[in-house]
Image: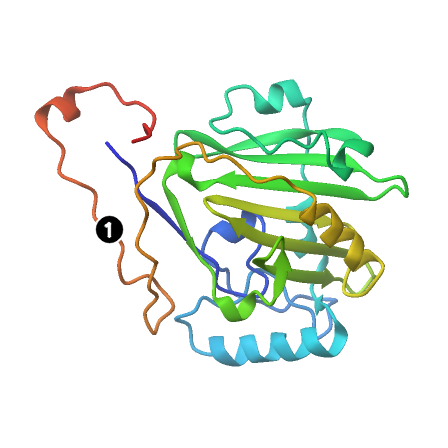
Amino acid sequence: MKRYRMLSIFTLCNVGAAALGMAALMTPGVGRTATDSCGLGLPPNAPGFAQQEAQREAEAKRNGFLRVCEANLQRYSVTFVPMTRATAGLDFAPVDLRTTPFARLQSLGGRKETMGDRASRLYRGFRTPDGRTLTLFEHDMSADGTRMRRDPKDEPERVNGLPARLIVLQTGSGRAVSVLSWRQGRRYYEIWFDANAARDPMRARLFGFANALPASVPACPNEPPFKEMILGPDGFPVDEPTLPTLTKEQMQAPSGKRSCP
C-alpha cells in the first residue's frame, strides 16, 4: 500500500525536526520579557495568527533575529551516535560530503529518524575550528511519501539558485541558533549552527556550506509527481488525498515498507 503523508511549514519559527508538526500555542513565562516567545506560535487557524506573524516579521526585520526563550533552542541540540550506527538501515543515500567544506571539520557523528516505517531523515554533526557546532539535516521525502509546501514569500534567500529561508533565533542571554533551510527536489535540507548569522561574516560562512552540497539522488527516482499542495483560508491543506481501498490480497499481505514505483 502506498502511504501518503503531508507536511506544511507555517510560521516563522516552524523549522527543524520540531517544525514538522502543528504549532504549539505561544505562552508567556515567568522571567522572560514581553518580546520573548516560546513554542512554535499560534496555528494558522487560530485568532490572532496574522497579528502574531506581523509582529514577528517586524521584529526580525528590526533586529535581524527573532527573540525566543531558552527552551526554543533545545530542539537544536541533537545527541549524536557513531556514523556507522546512524546510517545503518537508512532508506536513502545521504549527499556525499567528501569534496565539500564539511570534510575539513571534525565529525561528531549522526542520528537517523524515521517517518512511519521509513528511516528517511538524517542529522550529521560537526565541530568547526572555532569550536562551534554545525548540523546538517536531510529528509528524503520520496522515501516516506511526505509532501511539503512552503510559502514563496517566506523564502527570499537562495541556495544554489533554489528558494531558501534563513531564520536566526536568539535568547535574552545572547545564545543564538541560525537555521538555513531549502528543498532540492524531494530532498529537504537544514543547516544550523550555534551563532547569530544575521550578518557577515557568519552569514556568508553558513551559505558557503550550503552552496557546496552536491545534488541529491532521491530514494524513489521514479515516484509519480504530487499535485502542488493547496492551503485553504485557515492555513490547512484542502487537497489531502485519501488512502486507496485495499484489496483482499493487500490486506492479507504482511506489513512492509513503502515500495518505489
Q: What x and y, as percent, mark residue 29?
A: 66, 66
Residue at 68%, 49% (x, y): give it.
211
Number of marks present in the image shown: 1
Residue at 60%, 68% (x, y): give it.
156
Residue at 42%, 72% (x, y): give it.
46
Q: Which residue is mark 1?
A: 241
Q: What x and y, as percent, mark residue 173?
A: 83, 61
Q: Is residue 195 visible?
A: no
Q: What x and y, as percent, mark residue 53?
A: 55, 75
Residue 77, image quadrant: top right
Residue at 75%, 36% (x, y): give it.
102
Left or right: residue 12 compared with residue 166 = left
Q: How is the image coloured?
A: rainbow
- 127 above or below 65? above
Q: Is residue 49 visible?
A: yes
> For the residue marked with disc 1, what is the amino acid?
Pro
Q: Residue furthest left?
A: 248
Secondary structure of residue under mark 1: loop
Image quadrant holding the N terminus, namely top left
Q: Classify 10 Å Cα crowding around label 1: few (below 14), some (14-19), many (20 and above).
A: few
Residue 167, image quadrant: bottom right
- 76 above or below 176? above
- 177 above or below 61? above
Q: What x and y, as percent, mark residue 120?
A: 48, 34
Q: Residue furthest right?
A: 130
Image quadrant holding the C terminus, namely top left
